[in-house]
Amino acid sequence: MPIREYFGDDDWKNLESLPYAVSITVMAAAPSLLGAWGETRAMLEEPPRLAAASGSELVGLVSAGMQPRAGELIKEQQNLMKQDQMGYRSRTIAACRSAATALATVPPDEAESYKRWLLQIGEKVALAAKEHGVAFSDPEKAALGEIAVALGLQAER
């Protein structure tokens, strides 16, 4: 069965939106006015670059599907952030949990590749700007840690 057929439309939309949700969550964890351009550039450039390096069919399909709609998907996430700044991070964590549940239906190596790809995107966004002279701040690490736990990549501490 083609890998896309493992997912319903809502789950697929979530998989395509999550790279941007994770990026915005990381950016909001430690805002950097001077680094906003670098973070935004990383949010746009890293998903396809990292997808190409992943060797994953699932990651490649998600990346290919989201790229032509990047502006729309980012705008959607920005609007969600504006509507509920305090709850946006929780919303992203819930979307990660939902993705982990949906990913349980695909071969484990594909699920793992997608989850790792998401975290790599978040890390690249975090590293794209310094906050208070630090390339990877504690708030960014905390946000990515919560995302990793929600995806089932590490045990909660």
Image: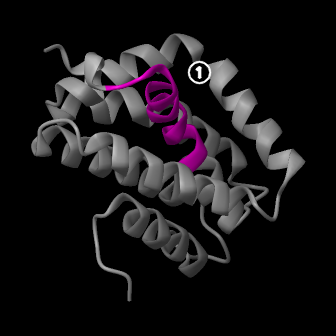
| Highlighted range, magenta | 7-22
Q: In the rendered view, tell whether residue 40 sits above or below residue 87.
A: above
Image position, residue 117 (x, y; %): 32, 44
Q: In the rendered view, tell whether residue 22 sits above or below residue 64.
A: below
* Residue 114, quarter of picture: top left
* Residue 75, quarter of picture: top right
- Magenta span: chief secondary structure: helix
Image position, residue 147 (x, y; %): 46, 63
Q: Residue at x 12, y 38 (%)?
A: 107
Give yes or no for residue 16 being in the magenta stretch: yes
Which one is nearer the viewer's eye here, 22 or 94? 94
Residue marked by disc 1: 70
Q: Residue at x 54, y 69 (%)?
A: 143
Decide: few, some or many residues near mark 1? Use Cα within 10 Å; few <14, some 14-19, many ≥20. Answer: some
36 lies left or right of 142: right
Give yes or no for residue 14 being in the magenta stretch: yes
Residue at far right of view = 83
Q: Residue at x 28, y 64 (%)?
A: 153
130 lies left or right of 14: right
Please tell me how many numbered marks the rendered image carries: 1
